[in-house]
Amino acid sequence: MRKKTSFDLTVPQLQKLEEQLKDFPEQIPAVAVRAINRAAEASRSAVSKFVREEYFIGASNLTGRIKIKKAYQADMVADIYAKDRTISSINFKVRANKPLPKKGSYAHLRVKKSSSGGMVKGSFITTVRGRHRNVFTRVTKNRFPLRSLHSPSVPQMMGHEDGIRVMEETAREVLEKRLEHEVERVLKQ
């Protein structure tokens, strides 16, 4: 699954940039690219923060999964995208097995901060093959095979309307500020 958001200059922004840099027309593409790339970086940070506010997931689990395709002078569009599989449930808020009377022991799992979470019937936390720690359930009544439980992927977490709105608003604000800053920088030289 892949979610993608693109950022580029609007026509009024480009006209304003051409007007401000009419004495330095060769600098227009470089100024635009630097501003677009900074807006994309800020937008990635904002959506990462948004996801961490909504879900019980650490920044280390998001950092490598949200990527940026930077803008270049030949292609003045920056893309922010996340392409990934579902994340192991152990990366979220999991409470270890606690025996409950008449119900057995279950793992209590919370993925979203706005939910109370719940117990997954027959689940337990263990490490298999000496390295893979996660929440598991048994597929049959036998000891093996085990089924690993997974939670939403990063594209699913960042891809709903609020996440996209946060990315777009941040990119718009930062792009305006960075364009002004880059124009001032060129004019001072």
Image (cartoon, helix red, strand yellow):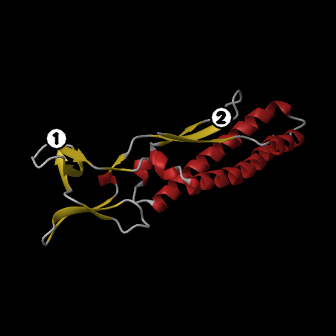
Q: Is residue 177 found left or right of 101 in the rendered image? A: right
Q: Give how far apart the Cα atoms at labels 1 and 2 are.
A: 43 Å
**Residue extending furthest top?**
74
User: Tag 2's secondary structure?
Assistant: loop
Q: Is residue 19 found left or right of 70 in the rendered image? A: right
Q: Residue at x 67, y 36 (%)?
A: 77
Q: Compare marks 1 and 2 and give the one earlier in the sequence.
A: 2
Regarding residue 46, the answer to whether it shows in the image is no
Q: Position of residue 75 (x, y in %)?
A: 69, 30
Q: Please name whichever residue, 65 or 86, is drawn nearer the observer in this view of the structure.
A: 86
Could you say which quadrant of the image residue 111 lies in?
Answer: bottom left
**Residue extending furthest left?**
142
Q: Residue at x 67, y 31 (%)?
A: 72
Q: Residue at x 40, y 56 (%)?
A: 57
Q: Is residue 166 found left or right of 122 in the rendered image? A: right
**Local crowd size for mark 1, using a 10 Å CA cut-off: few (<14), some (14–19), many (≥20):** few
Q: Label 1 is placed on what type of residue?
A: Arg
Label annotation for residue 71 = 2
Q: Which residue is mark 1?
A: 129
Q: Position of residue 45 (x, y in %)?
A: 55, 51
Q: Residue at x 89, y 41 (%)?
A: 19
Q: Please name whichever residue, 68 or 1, is drawn nearer the observer in this view of the structure.
A: 1
- Taking 29 as reference, is 161 above or below it? below
Regarding residue 42, the answer to whether it shows in the image is yes
Could you say which quadrant of the image residue 131 lies in?
Answer: top left
**Residue extending furthest front?**
140
Q: Label 2 is placed on what type of residue?
A: Ala
- Taking 120 as reference, is 145 above or below it? above
Q: Position of residue 58 (x, y in %)?
A: 40, 55
User: Tag 1's secondary structure?
Assistant: loop
- Taking 25 as reference, is 66 above or below it? below
